[in-house]
Image: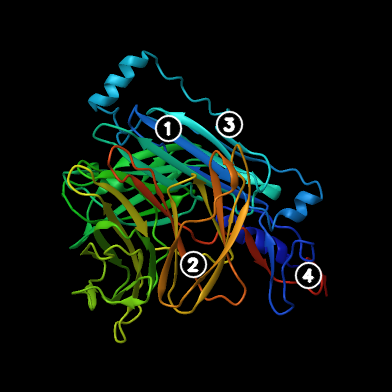
Amino acid sequence: MNRSTPSLIAAAVALAAVTGFAAVTAPGGDSAKADGKGPARLPVERSSLLCPAPSLSDLAETTYTAYTPKGSGDAGAKAGAAGSAVLKPAVTPLTDGTPAKSTDKADKDKKGKKGKTPEKPDPDKAVITLKEPGKPASATADGSDAPALAGSADGPLAPGWAVQQTTVVSAGDTRAVLGTRCTEPDTDFWFPGASTAKTRQDYVHLTNPDDTAAVADIELFGKDGVIKSEVGEGITVPAKSSVPVLLSTLTSAAADDLTVHVTTRSGRVGAVVQASDAKAGADWLSASADPAASQVIPGIPGDATDVRLVVYAKGADDADLKVRLAGASGSFTPAGLDTVHVKSGMTASFDLKNVTRGEAGSLLLAPTSDGGKTPIVAALRVVRGTGDKQETAYIPATAAVGDRSTAADNRAKGSTLAFTAPTAAATVKVTASPGTEGGEPQTKTYTVKAGTTLAVEPPVPSGLKGSYALTVETQPGSGPVYASRTLALPQDGIPMFTVQTLPDDKGTVAVPAAEQDLSVLDD
């Protein structure tokens, strides 16, 4: 009897492709990492990223920074393997959910002074191209016509490829700093912290990188459970295109705190929420870590004037949670939050006010001893400043740094790294890349005590010109560590800022070692 069995490599490739990454090299190559007891860790050979359309404002100034750290892909690079990493415009079709042009007077004044009609984006023209690992590249775009981007990296540029999109709107009703890590395409996203309140204008941006249309559903969950809306079902996202959907068009209910669930019936999309507040600025709300019984939200700035926790309980049972704030010297329970109760299928919110009181911290959520293991998703809405000089950012629950993570687009001043080690002491190595226009890399190692948060000004490349990237690597023997990067770009007395979490970059994939070739087995 002849029997064909798919090879282990093919299985690994298929698994990697589901998460937006594709083929890996064969076991036993120079870049494999194995201890003889488990699967080898091999670098991915292709990764995909999607960036949303930056802003509706004609005053918007957007910077894209791309970076692939040196490391797991070096073996291929030394062998002369070719690679590319390119992001190009994703054409945005006109739909009922497409945002209208900004009506901000400041935008109109600037547009009138320019007196120019923006050029239509060329889908075949690269917006940003990265040429080699270890050297960041940047590009800029101005105005409200900057499109969503889609692209991929392959060869030695694929493992750990990261792109940061940072937009500054300097004046008008939409003034803010909006930052987001461009995301991998996927089929399931959770966004606790969105809103349809009268002061908010929140859009879900759906971007499709593939050659065929994707079909997505958007579900909304409020304090009383699911909010019925047929409008959010079966949203078509054309091939290689992006569709923004205004949440308030999906329901007539004005809800201060919502959880948005995006799934696809067919295809994949990149999804992210642009949340704008008429009084407190705007930022991107990235997806929460996958639903789990415990969650970690790292890096609340020490000068936060208002912090709001939003939690959604997924599954048939309610969630009873312990809330701990990990600060510089240890963990404690915020006043009045010994335990919190979140009903099944509902969104709950909790006002933490100025919980950090001058000291950066991280929020740790875990089930009570008798609270079961109901999976939750969570995020924080963080405000800095007061009165008419407020700015808002969002910090979703995140996965651990794992082997490595990267924060692109850091400036000479304004970056802060926050690390938290919930269960055991952790050690991380932080490497500052060369600048986009020059400079020499620098490295520093930090130790984080168990149950604490360590906030540091990261190393800066010597002789820095331009912006640079920071790569965080968990060291051998370290406990799990969670991290975020805050980028502060204050302007006119407004503490404008954005926060990005730093989960594992998925630059490698586990491939079981094969002792024999099982691709064809003859009996």
Q: CA distance from mark 4 to mark 1?
A: 46 Å
Secondary structure state at the residue bearing disc 3: loop
Considering every residue shown, the one lying at the far front of the view is 463
Residue at numbered disc 2: 400
Evaluate if marks 4 and 1 touch, with contact meaning CB atoms under 8 Å apart.
Answer: no
| Residue 435 x, y percent position in the rendering | 59, 42
One can see residue 97 in this view: yes
The answer to whether 357 is drawn above or below residue 112 in the figure is: below
Instruction: Identify residue type, mark 3.
Output: Ala
The residue tagged 4 is 518
Q: Is residue 323 found left or right of 116 in the rendered image?
A: left
Indicate which disc, 4 or 2, sits on the residue closer to the N terminus.
2
Q: Is residue 462 left or right of residue 277?
A: right
| Circle 3 residues within 10 Å: few <14, some 14–19, many ≥20 | some
Q: Secondary structure at mark 4?
A: loop
Look at label 1 and name its amino acid.
Answer: Thr
Quick check: marks 3 and 1 in contact, CB under 8 Å?
no
N-terminal label among 3 and 2: 3
Callout 4 crowding tier (Cα within 10 Å): few <14, some 14–19, many ≥20: few
The image position of residue 259, as x and y in percent, is: 28, 57
